[in-house]
Amino acid sequence: MPLNPFRTLRHRNFRLFWFGQTLSLVGTWMQTMAQGWLALELSNSALVVGLVAAASSLPILLFSFHAGVVVDRVDKLRTLRICQALLAAQAGLLWWFTATGHITIGWLITLAVANGLISSLEIPARQSLVIDLVGREELPGAIALNSSGFNLARVVGPGIGAIILARAGLAACFGVNALSYVAVLVGLFMIVLPRRAPPATQVSAVDGIREGLVFMRDTPSVAALMRLVTVFSVLGIPFLTLMPVVARDMLHLGAGGYGLLLASVGVGGLLGALGLAAIGDHFSRGRLLLIASMSFASLLIIFSFVRSPAVACVVLVGIGFSMIVNNALSNSLLQHLVPDHLRGRMMATYAFVVIGISQVLGSLAAGSIAHAAGVSFAIGGAATVMLGYAYWAFQSRVELRTL
């Protein structure tokens, strides 16, 4: 099979989904950059920057398991359309509060919580819909290509956002994001899927949650993979939350430099995702996961010692590459291992860990440590633990090596 990272785009439904999501994510990354900078401007505190990031993830932490049961029982496409429309409204409100000068840390946190409430249902619906768009055999390539779109937006979004921020202010970044949801909504309404009868509801929501958790606990490969995902999400991903502090205090950069740092992560992530989409099943996924995990942790340790903006951008390209390969591989492996009737609950659990626990516990802890001991120690110390865990896990758990 030729190494073509774009082969899954031959599916019309997935093509509509991918282009709409990617265009919308450009706006989302503009908002992410602007929101982090706004939190820092309003508070001048690394702890508050972490708190704002955690606020958007707290509802995901609280409601993901119930949302997973809901997603397994309802029309995923219709659910996704409703959630995307609500996210557009949330972005519009954030624009209005900022443009009129009414924005405060309190309102910023409130709107972040609203975003999290919607996302707790939107994320498992979106993740579990992909298999319906391309089929099981092409799922790994589709997930990797989704990651490439995410990282293309991470490159383009902060770059455009930095220009808009400099010329039109923070509010304009939020306004453009609200408008970007038009692209994803148009794509979603153009998708046509076969009508399916909803599954018969034979158990309560609590029993449905228990069914999913028992499967994950009693399937050794899933359990080992979820433990790895948890450690890397809680200790690794929060470095992105600290990026405004890194830019200002560690590298002495302004908002434009902050956008450049995020874009560097995106360049690496885009390259990693396209590479992963291209190779498909040509290489052992377990071996690739080992290499990506060790590389991600090692590069974060190196990054914590960097004080040159140019060197930081180069290292961040490598971090983005290894981080996305690690995340996309974990996601596709989990979806391959789970039966269809538990897919929504599996993706809800994945979101619970990668977004919920990562941001609520990871970002708050990282922000607190950065506030007390410095951002360099917060990133480097966490990465050292990641590296030690990855070495132990791949040495002691045969399930990971044979994935």
Image (spheres, grey):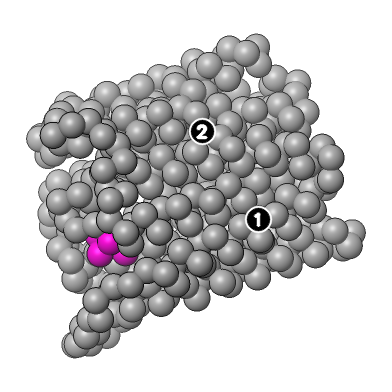
Label 2 or label 1, whichever comes before in sequence order: 1
* Image point (42%, 69%), residue name: 190
Q: What residue is drawn where x is 41% and y is 77%?
A: 78
Q: Disc 2 and disc 1: Cα gap in Å?
A: 18 Å
Of residues 234 and 275, the one drawn nearer to the viewer in this rendering: 275
The kind of residue on which mark 2 rests is Gly
Where residue 17 sits, quadrant-wise, is bottom left
Query: Which image quadrant: the N terminus?
Result: top left
| Residue position for label 2 | 266
Res. 41 mark = none
Residue 295 in view here:
yes
Name the spot of residue 233 as percent of width and height, x first.
Answer: 42, 42
Residue that protrudes farthest toward the right in the picture? 101
Judge whether residue 2 is colored magenta.
no
- The answer to whether residue 275 is above or below residue 196 is above
Q: What residue type is labelled 1?
A: Asn
Question: Which element type, helix, strand or loop, lies under badge 1?
Answer: helix
Left or right position of 348 against 365: left
Decide: is 394 above or below 172: above
10 Å crowding of disc 2: few (<14), some (14-19), many (20+): many
> Seen in the image, is 208 located left or right of residue 379?
left
Residue 122 pos. (x, y %): 45, 66
Instruction: Give yes or no for residue 132 being in the magenta stretch.
Output: yes
- Residue shown at 13% from the left, 57% from the top: 218
Residue drawn at point x = 37 percent, y = 30 percent: 272
Report whether residue 370 is seen. Answer: no
Pinpoint residue 213: horizontal percent, then vertical percent: 24, 64
| Magenta extent | 129-133
Q: To which quarter of the image does residue 323 belong? A: top left
223 sits left or right of 276 in the view: left
> What numbered label is drawn on residue 177?
1
